[in-house]
Amino acid sequence: MQAVMTSGDASDKSLVYSAIEPLLGAGLATLGGDAWRRHRKGITPSLHLDILHDFVPIFSKQGAAFADTLAELADSGDAFDVTPLSGACANHAIFETVMSSDLDKDDPMKRAILDGIPKALDHFMYRVCRPWFLSEWAYSLHRSQFSDYVNLKNTFNLFIQRVIREKKEALKNNEPLPQRKRQAFLDHVLSSAEGAALSEAELAEEVKTFVGIASGGSMDALTFFIYTLAIRQDIQDKIRQEMDDILGEDCGRLVEHSDLAHMQYTGRVIKETLRYFTTLPTFARTVSEDLPLPSGFTIPRGCQVAFWLPYVHRNPQWFPEPNKFDPDRFLPENSRGRHPFAFVPFSAGPRNCIGQRYSMMFLKAVAAAIVPRLRFEVPDDGPKRLEDVPLTMNLTVSVRGGANIRVHRR
Ligand code: HEM
């Protein structure tokens, strides 16, 4: 895996990615070759640590709004699937940090985008499982699917064009960018020297990519994190204790990036959640030249190589008793000597996830907002052990039948 993931001859994505590109953008996740290198160079500085630090209060604010929603549901006493609510929290954070845009409910276009992201993933999987539809021309013959696909494509394009146009106008008129101190990712790209290497059309594709990938990735990780706490009360109690120690009496305050460094145990639980449930379990590359492996085998030029991370993450050589959920595997003393590619929920090598630090910060900040105020549990008919959680997979993994929980105010 390391040989492939670090090879310059295997940095292009597999052919199947062509099925997601029209919807989620010809951006970092799908581009190959020089175009990908130029985009990555143009965008990386806009996710610099200093910029991410400014995002933490936004994550925290969105976490607090999420906690309010959950608290209202606590009063009803009913069980509910937390997935769409995690998704809403992730989306609010992404719209604000990527384009400093409020996700107000009365903007039908934004709603259409959010409803459209899961549909876009459905189209992708539909076509991957029926590769004769990978060609857009062939897909156009599938009348019922294709009209929905074209509608989605148009909605995404119109929305992104509108966002970029508004941002450019604001820059041209020298209007103060929203929350100047906390510049959104897009404001930063538009005003940076590196970002100037990207045309308006290229940037529009990147915004689509970021909204699509970031919202899906964050929603799944947050859902599994909460579901894990609902099943493992002992872990939930330890996180709450850690948050109480950090926040003290003031459990409602917004957290800053300096608080996150103290959330060591929470960080280990997030990592173990990503190992155990591996929310994005697979991705694939094309090998452009014969690629010799350390084993002596050679992957021939033109091969498509897919990785199956649940297998990697449950390798007993690096994770003894791999089916046991144990956050302390990620204590420094227990991680020493572990192969650097044994734990790769964000991929690794030059095409690793550019949002890895963003995600970890988001998840910790939201945990700090919800865990001190609420207690989570699974309903009586829910799984009693993490091993019993029924999983299903589209492009990402989710809980079959929904991540149903019950919430109590603390
Ligand atoms: C827990 C949440 C997330 C997980 C598990 C995750 C995982 C991954 C993985 C496995 C890849 C490699 C995909 C491939 O090779 O096809 C990837 C790529 C990527 N991710 Fe994430 N991701 C998450 C959140 C995010 C967020 C929040 C952002 C944006 C802020 C983001 C932006 C990207 C981009 C742009 C790429 C493509 C990078 C490239 O090829 O240069 N991800 N992610």
Image: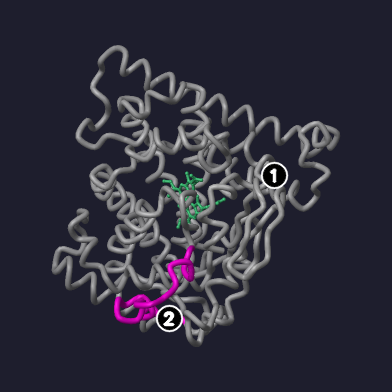
Which range is magenta? 325-344
Identify the residue at horizontal 46%, vertical 61% (top origin): 221
Local SS, label 1? helix
Q: Is the residue indicated by label 2 positioned so its CB lies within 8 Å of ligand 1?
A: no
Q: Residue 310 in the image: x percent, y percent?
A: 58, 70
Numbered badge on residue 232: 2
Local SS, label 2? loop
Q: Amino acid at mark 2?
A: Arg
- Which residue corresponds to mark 1? 15
Identify the residue at horizontal 38%, vertical 33% (top origin): 99
Question: Residue furthest toward the right?
Answer: 141
Q: Residue 103 in the image: x percent, y percent?
A: 41, 38
Residue 286's place in the image compared with 273, above or below, is above
Is disc 2 surrounded by few (<14), some (14 to 19) or many (20+) residues within 10 Å?
A: some
| Magenta-colored stretch includes residue 329 | yes
Numbered badge on residue 121: none
Quarter of the picture containing the C terminus is bottom left
Q: Amino acid at mark 1?
A: Leu
Identify the residue at horizontal 41%, vertical 49% (top origin): 355
**Label located before the other in sequence (2 or 1):** 1
